[in-house]
């Protein structure tokens, strides 16, 4: 069942259009993450769902009802903001109960919901404190609790973890994941952090300049990015991008890829649209490995080695100002300044049209 449907949604400020014909259907109980760089329109889109921004065109359906003209309070959604938006003069209990009181709920029902939500979020001991007496993580739990007590049709999160330090972000990310697994509530979550997106989402919608570039499961976007933008944005460290050229194509579907002076035989591309000429090659750091100079696709000096304990990343200067990121076995004795030779896995190559940025290879 579809809980929220965005159909040809547009947003303009005067003559400037910033959201372009967005179509997304969000299933009941689904956790959808809107991700993209600052200024891509993801928070504006979320605020349009919430009713905090006017919709310039298209139809927004929540719970089977068109809500374009409805006020935020009539949309049966609850929003958790980046800055918590707690009332400083109220206790935690009063903050969580405020929305229910405004709806005229009975006191015993309010107390029951507040107590239940506080237990879920482990903030029971803080119910009589004020926001100024809480840590950032505790304030965010209160903001989430205020949303939970309303039992809405959907939850909207607008970059809720961006004000927290790195360790607390990880902790709160786990709490949000556990909360969703427990409640199975429809959730739309905005972030610019692709790690948050990959670890929380059932599906991710990657946005770029007001356009949805691709929607899919996290691993689908990671392994089969539909565009160069998605390929660069999803994954940390980012995908390596190198200019190349499909130099020849045989009738049996086999082709040769020319990469910085080296020729590589492409996997079978029969059944796909033929392509010859310039392409953009993408390959992830874990799909490159050390090899002999004769087998190498890329050779260069190791400029930096990042040893992270479980992983080691090497950054290799391959000429023309290009840096290649390679994931080495964690105990590899690589040394900064040495010459390194690496080759890729042909089956893990991503080929993009350099003019449009769209994916060429289907495998």
Image (cartoon, rainbow, N blue to C red):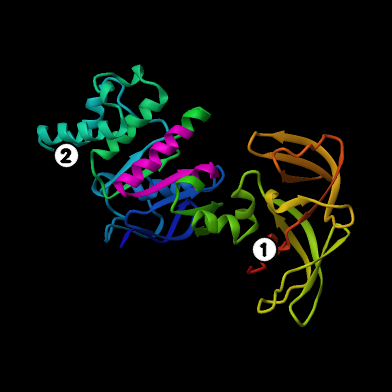
Q: Residue at x 76, y 51 (%)?
A: 289
Judge by depth and name the residue closer to the eye, 304 or 53.
304
The magenta stretch is 170-197
Q: Is residue 342 above or below residue 224?
A: above
Whether residue 262 can be seen here: yes
Q: Quadrant of residue 213?
A: bottom right
Image position of 334 with respect to 355: above or below: above
Please state, as top left, top right, bottom left or bottom right, where the C terminus lies in the image: bottom right
1 and 2 marks in contact (CB < 8 Å): no
Q: Quadrant of the image for the N terminus?
A: bottom left
Nearer the observer, 62 or 53: 62
Kindly indicate the quadrant of the structure image that contains residue 38. top right
Local SS, label 2: loop
Q: x and y percent of residue 71 in the render? A: 27, 47
Q: Is residue 144 left or right of residue 271?
A: left
**148 or 156: nearer the viewer:** 148
Rendered location of residue 79, percent (x, y): 34, 41
Measured from the top left, where is residue 47 in percent x and y? Answer: 39, 45
110 lies left or right of 138: left
Residue at 60% x, 49% y: name it. 233
* In the displayed structure image, the side of residue 328 where residue 40 appears, left or right: left
Majority secondary structure of magenta residues: helix
Q: Does the magenta run of residues contain 223?
A: no
Q: Residue at x 39, y 40 (%)?
A: 176
Circle 2 residue: 103
Q: Residue furthest bottom?
A: 251
Q: Label 1: which residue?
A: 356
> If you read the primary sequence from the N terminus, does the residue marked by circle 1 or circle 2 appear first?
2
Q: Element at badge 1?
A: loop
- Up the image or down, 179 lies above or below 214; here it is above
For residue 160, say whether it is visible. no
């Amino acid at each position: 069942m579809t809980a929220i449907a965005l159909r040809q949604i547009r947003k303009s400020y005067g003559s400037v259009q910033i959201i372009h014909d967005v179509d997304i259907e969000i299933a009941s109980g689904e956790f959808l993450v809107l991700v993209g760089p600052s200024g891509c329109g993801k928070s504006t889109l979320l605020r349009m769902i919430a009713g905090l921004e006017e919709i310039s065109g298209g139809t927004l359906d929540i719970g089977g009802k068109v809500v374009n003209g409805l006020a935020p309070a009539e949309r049966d959604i609850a929003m958790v903001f980046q800055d918590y938006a707690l009332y400083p003069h109220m206790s935690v209990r009063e903050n969580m109960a405020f929305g229910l009181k405004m709806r005229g709920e009975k006191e015993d029902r309010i107390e029951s919901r507040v107590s239940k939500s506080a237990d879920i979020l482990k903030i029971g001991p803080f119910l009589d404190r004020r926001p100024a007496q809480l840590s950032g993580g505790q304030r965010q739990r209160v903001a989430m609790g205020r949303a939970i007590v309303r039992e809405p049709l959907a939850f909207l999160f607008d970059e809720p973890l961006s004000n927290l330090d790195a360790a607390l972000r990880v902790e709160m990310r786990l709490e949000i994941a556990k909360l969703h697994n427990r409640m199975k509530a429809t959730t739309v979550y905005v972030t610019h952090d692709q790690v948050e997106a990959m670890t929380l989402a059932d599906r991710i919608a990657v946005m770029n300049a007001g356009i949805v570039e691709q929607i899919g499961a996290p691993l689908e976007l990671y392994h089969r990015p539909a565009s160069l933008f998605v390929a660069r944005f999803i994954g940390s460290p980012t995908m390596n991008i190198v200019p190349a050229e499909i130099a020849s194509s045989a009738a049996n579907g086999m082709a040769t890829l020319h990469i910085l002076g080296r020729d590589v035989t492409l996997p079978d591309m029969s059944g796909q649209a033929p392509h010859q000429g310039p392409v953009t090659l993408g390959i992830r750091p874990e799909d490159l490995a050390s090899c002999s100079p004769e087998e190498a696709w890329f050779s260069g000096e190791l400029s930096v080695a990042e040893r992270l304990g479980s992983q080691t990343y090497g950054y290799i200067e391959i000429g023309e100002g290009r840096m290649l990121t390679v994931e080495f076995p964690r105990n590899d004795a690589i040394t900064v300044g040495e010459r390194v030779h690496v080759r890729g896995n042909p089956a893990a190559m991503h080929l993009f049209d350099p003019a449009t940025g769209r994916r060429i290879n289907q495998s």
